[in-house]
Image (tube, helix red, strand yellow):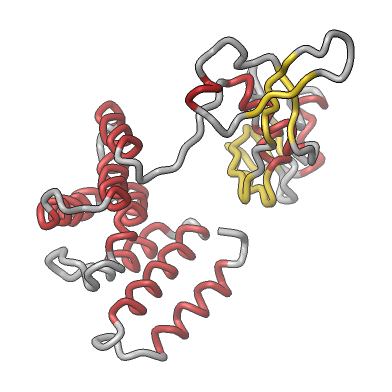
Amino acid sequence: FQGDAATARAQAEEALTLVDPLESRSVRVYARHALGAAAVAEGAFGIAYDQLRMAFTADGAPVHYHASYPALADLAAAAVRCGRRAEAAAIIERTAADLAGNASPRLHALISRARGLLADPGDAEPHFRAARQAGGIEFAEYDEGMFMFGLLAAAHRLPFLPTRAGLGSGVLRVNPDLRTVRLPYGDGEELVAVPALTMDVALVHLSRADARGNAQYLGPDPYFDDLYAKAAGRCYVSCERLVDTADLLKEGPVQSLLIS
């Protein structure tokens, strides 16, 4: 996912050649999971599904008693993208039935997330809510204004930015990691110190782009796409239409060239 899927694939394939698949089932499963992740990174979702599917037997049982389960959510995500929802759903439901209340919080969260991915859009939220409530997913509370300042701080390589957003609300109570600072000027007003929200990878989708990654939005709102790109170590751009660089400004003003 950090831009070198070919190396990841080569290392996983080498791992498969070094072990007896019957004696080292965990290594076999981890290698298939890695091959699936490499295929996802390249957009080959059918191949990804086939690799992840091999973490389970033909009838849907885990190849390894604990190594197979972390692949459940990725299996579901790949299934959605390659049209194999029903097969993946059968594996998810078999896992849930086999564990029958004995799943760890993390595994419960994975099953709920997989169900959410496979569900129709209108039915997905209860499954994602169950994953959050199980405690298997780490999350932090920010309001939209605080989130924007966190991205701005990361984009400008600052440790934090002060803001009034969040003052007087319950966000400081439910997110105990947040801190406040005193303004060093004037009356010393207390402000929320929103930490930089740095990301390993950003995925953004814009209206048009060229092959070099210059990207343009043509809608009424750029949202936070430029901040995501600047706050991340790597940025991947998808677009509605790929055009030559010289053609980017044939539509929209220069300010619409959001990412370059």
Image side of residue 67 versus residue 200, left or right: left
Residue lying at 89% horizontally and 15% vertically, measured from the top left = 185
Q: Hey, which residue is sitting farthest right in the picture?
A: 185
In this picture, is 39 found above or below 123? below
Q: Residue at x 39, y 84 (%)?
A: 16
- Residue 184 image position (x, y, % from top left): 86, 20
The quarter in which the C terminus is drawn is: top right
- Which of the 4 image quarters holds residue 155? top right
* Residue name at image x 47 percent, y 37 percent: 139
Picture quarter with the N terminus: bottom right
Instruction: Name the residue located 62 percent from the left edge and 34 percent from the top edge.
Output: 206
**Residue 204's image quarter?**
top right
Q: Is residue 8 left or right of residue 260?
A: left
Towards the viewer: 158 or 184: 184
Q: Position of residue 12 (x, y in %)?
A: 46, 77
Q: Is residue 145 above or below residue 138?
A: above
**Viewed as shown, does residue 152 lie left or right of 86?**
right
Residue 149 location (% of width, % of height): 69, 26
Label tally? 0
The vertical placement of 53 against 88, above or below, is below
To which quarter of the image does residue 53 belong? Answer: bottom left
Q: Position of residue 81 (x, y in %)?
A: 37, 49
Position of 254 compared to 63: left or right?
A: right
